[in-house]
Amino acid sequence: MSTTSASTESIKAALDRIADVQLRYSRYKHPLWKGLMDGQFERPQVREFMLQMSIIPLYNHLYHGPLYVICPDPEWRELIAEVVYEEGTGRLFADGHPHWKLWLRLGNAFGISDEEMWNADLCAEALAYRAFCKEICSSDFLTGISAHMLGAEAQVPGAVGSVYEGLKKKFGLSDHDLAFYIVHNEADADHSDIGVRLLGRFAKSEVDLDRAVKAATEMVLVSQVLFDAIHRRVLSAC
């Protein structure tokens, strides 16, 4: 495939646009995440959060998997394969514990059985989120990878560490219980320059950059709808 790409200046401008969206909808500003970070929620409320939020860690194969399949570049396919491998096995960052199992472990700490987690009464917004993510990650590669890495995953670094601290302080959980958040805080820092590398490789024009910004923005907005819905469920859980 062609190795030409958009200019460095154009790529920086596109990433700045995405950063503005991320700042506007920062998890630190959302009442769901602030509540978790600040210890505002009681155990039944965190249980509801865990059940609804399972739409991401328990179904991540539907999001990362298609990106691996449609990736047109062998070097990037290798990178995505590592992500899929880590999510499914945990052998890179999680001592051999798949990330979905770490999520179930955290649910267990709040009295949620594995069966309950897999059969959660998911809200409509969670179901819509899953459908959206699966669809966009199965579209053309630039759109899918921009939505996933520049939209969804870019929200995670730092925020998960604050959630870890909030849950640990509020409920006295062990690092074993909270391994899901510890692993993600460390693993996501490994991709700090992903935006420049991604757009530098796959964005060939201003039109491509606009598509990347649009995909990342849409992912952030859809995530906000999910967070708003989960927050409503959390507030009604007590």
Image: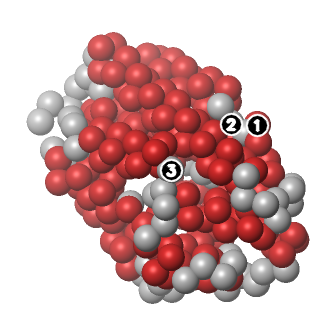
- Report whether residue 141 is seen: yes
Of the numbered discs 3 and 2, the one sitting upstream in the chain is: 2
From this view, report whether residue 174 is shown above or below residue 47: below
Taking the spot 22% from the left edge, 37% from the top edge, the residue there is 139
Q: How is the image coloured?
A: secondary structure
Image quadrant where one finds the N terminus = top left
Question: Picture quarter containing residue 6?
Answer: top left
Taking the spot 21% from the left edge, 35% from the top edge, the residue there is 140
The dot on residue 29 is 1
Taking the spot 54% from the left edge, 20% from the top edge, the residue there is 17
Q: Secondary structure at mark 2?
A: loop
Dot 2 crowding, Cα within 10 Å, few <14, some 14–19, many 20+? some
Tag 3: residue type? Cys
Q: Position of residue 134 (x, y in %)?
A: 30, 47
Q: Position of residue 69 (x, y in %)?
A: 17, 54
Residue annotated with mark 2? 26
Q: Are marks 2 and 1 in contact (CB under 8 Å)?
A: yes
The dot on residue 123 is 3
From this view, report whether residue 82 is shown above or below residue 201: below
